[in-house]
Image (tube, rainbow, N blue to C red):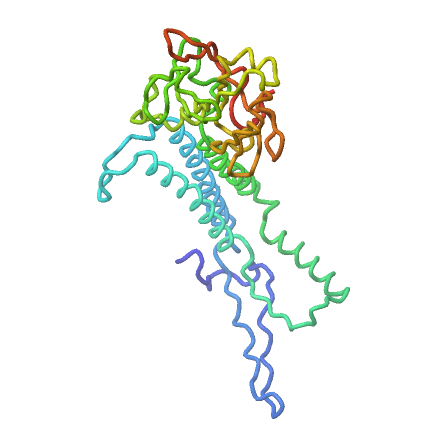
Amino acid sequence: MSETGRHEDVPEETLPERETAHEGAVATAENPFADPGLPEHEHRAQDIDERAAKRSENTVALLFLVSMLATVGFIASYVTIPIDKIVYIWPIGHISGLNFALGLTLGVALFCIGAGAVHWARTLMSDVEVADDRHPIEAAPEVKAKVLADFKLGAEESQFGRRKLIRNTLFGAMAMVPLSGVVLLRDLGPLPGTKLRTTNWKKGVRLVNQSTNLPLRPEDIAVGSLTFAKPEGLEEDQEDFNEKIAKDALMLVRIQPQDIKDKDELSWSHEGIVAFSKICTHVGCPISLYEQQTHHVLCPCHQSTFDLSDGGKVIFGPAGHALPQLHITEKDGFLEAASGFGEPVGPSFWERG
């Protein structure tokens, strides 16, 4: 005999009290459609047999426990399986082992919560159909009182307070599933460490013309010209070229020494040649517009303007601080770095100081 079917062999006095279907209204001339009413309520096995109810409770709790284990498996897979690992799954074929494990475990975690909730509702919560007349949108005080009473009755009939095993395992499953999303925050990128503070510029590194790929000599920089440079050894065919040039890009201009206003800038220059980071300190756009007469450089993205004759200070726009300067010198007829940048290049970040 089905657990959810009708049990005609159970004595009537053992059945719980339930609302019965009301008599259908008789058709009249004013209302030709009679109210058919509700069919007689059929009791489930769980309504009359506590052992059946306990089995349903254990089933629901098991589904919630499996959901928790699947969430743990999701996190473990994310941490332990290499991103480039390829596995063969029949009949799918060769796929990413990490993607397969993440999809499988997260799917099981969500499915078990849903399946447990559905089984709980179908076997333990009340399934009595209740008919109610339509009422105005604005609820009367007695309706509000009835809603609260119905809510309390529903909470009682759901057995949420009584079935502590279901309640506790549901809380556990619902609390652990969001951990899957928290773990995914790791894909925002690796922890930066000190990479935002350092570049490939250091003492003895030659300046190479980014256009010709040749080491720069002082005579290559004409007064009023703007030249872009990169560190020697950084080539465009390198896998991490874009990542490195985003911090190492350099711009050089030659200014008459008497026109340099900042003493520290003058001491870090060579024969009027000054070297500043090409990366705007606002959001990291490359700076490329230079005004020879004013010695100003303009970022094309948001019009931040810097004075290269006065320590690269911001004179207009949203940039937060001056362009970092690179200390340069000459050795064997070529320009080279005398040290790294004095401060981190690019936009501000929370640990920049």
**The C terminus: image quadrant:** top right
Q: Residue at x 58, y 69 (%)?
A: 20
Question: Where is 331 relative to 245, above or below?
Answer: above
Direction from residue 223 to residue 102 in the image, left or right:
left
Question: Where is 266 relative to 131, above or below?
Answer: above
Q: Residue at x 56, y 42 (%)?
A: 167
Residue 309 vs residue 162, the one in the foreground: 309
Residue 92 vs residue 328, the one in the foreground: 328
Residue 92 vs residue 162, the one in the foreground: 92
Position of residue 326 measured from the top left corner of the image (x, y, whole percent) = 49, 16
**The N terminus: image quadrant:** bottom left
Position of residue 287 measured from the top left corner of the image (x, y, whole percent) = 49, 31
| Residue 130 occupies quadrant | bottom right
Q: Residue at x 70, y 57 (%)?
A: 148
Position of residue 211 measured from the top left corner of the image (x, y, whole percent) = 35, 27
Residue that protrudes farthest toward the right in the picture: 141
Count of marks placed on residues: 0
Position of residue 3 measured from the top left corner of the image (x, y, whole percent) = 43, 55
Residue 145 vs residue 206, the one in the foreground: 206
Residue that protrudes farthest toward the bottom in the picture: 29
Direction from residue 321 to residue 179 in the image, left or right:
left
